Image (spheres, helix red, strand yellow):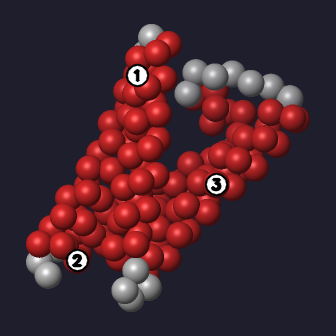
Amino acid sequence: MRVFGLAVLWLGGLGFLAFGVAFLFAPLATMAMAGLPLSGALAATELMAFYGGVELALGAVLIGCALTAGRLRDGLKLSLIVYGSIAAARIAGMLSTGADSTFLRAALALEAGLAILAAIALFAGSKAR
């Protein structure tokens, strides 16, 4: 089950890195793909800093956990917490505002899916002990 856990960390880490790079180098275009057209240097800088910076950091930590002996469970816990929190907040937002789009559904499926995979890997790892 270790291989499965490592695959979950790599998948989650690379997902964060990909979005981080997209927001760092094309913040306004990346946000527009989500249906949120923004403009101006202030918006671009904020997207670069928060979305780009936080996602790059999370991706690096998850991949670092995958590459460091003894850190698999730590990375899986972080992945479960972060992706699960994002999915829960997205669901809350969709329900409270009535917002719905293909982008929101796809993002929710990815986030919830990665949280579930991390939970499965954690549960399987604890049963193997």
**Of the residues shown, which amino acid type is indicated by label 1?**
Thr
Tell me which numbered mark, 1 or 3, is placed earlier along the sequence.
3
Instruction: Identify which amino acid the numbered label 2 is placed on.
Output: Arg
Residue that sits furthest to the right in the current view:
41
Query: Residue at image x 33%, y 50%?
Result: 115
* Residue 31: percent from left, percent from top: 64, 32
Q: As displayed, is residue 56 above or below residue 3? A: above
- Give the spatial CA distance, label 2 vs label 3: 27 Å
What residue is shown with label 1?
102
x 11%, y 72%: residue: 127
Q: Quadrant of the C terminus?
A: bottom left
* Numbered mark located on residue 54 in the image: 3
| Helix, strand or loop at mark 3 | helix
Instruction: Determine crowd level at label 2: few under 14, some 14-19, many 20+ residues with C-alpha closer than 10 A.
Output: some
- Please, which residue is most extreme toward the top here? 98
Q: Earlier in the sequence, mark 2 or mark 3?
A: 2
Label at residue 2: 2
Whole-Å distance between the Cαs marked 1 and 2?
Answer: 34 Å
Label 1 and label 3: CA atoms lie apart by: 24 Å
Residue 90 percent location from the top left of the image: 45, 30
- Could you tell me if the residues under marks 1 and 3 are in contact, i.e. CB atoms within 8 Å? no
On the question of residue 66 being in view, the answer is: no
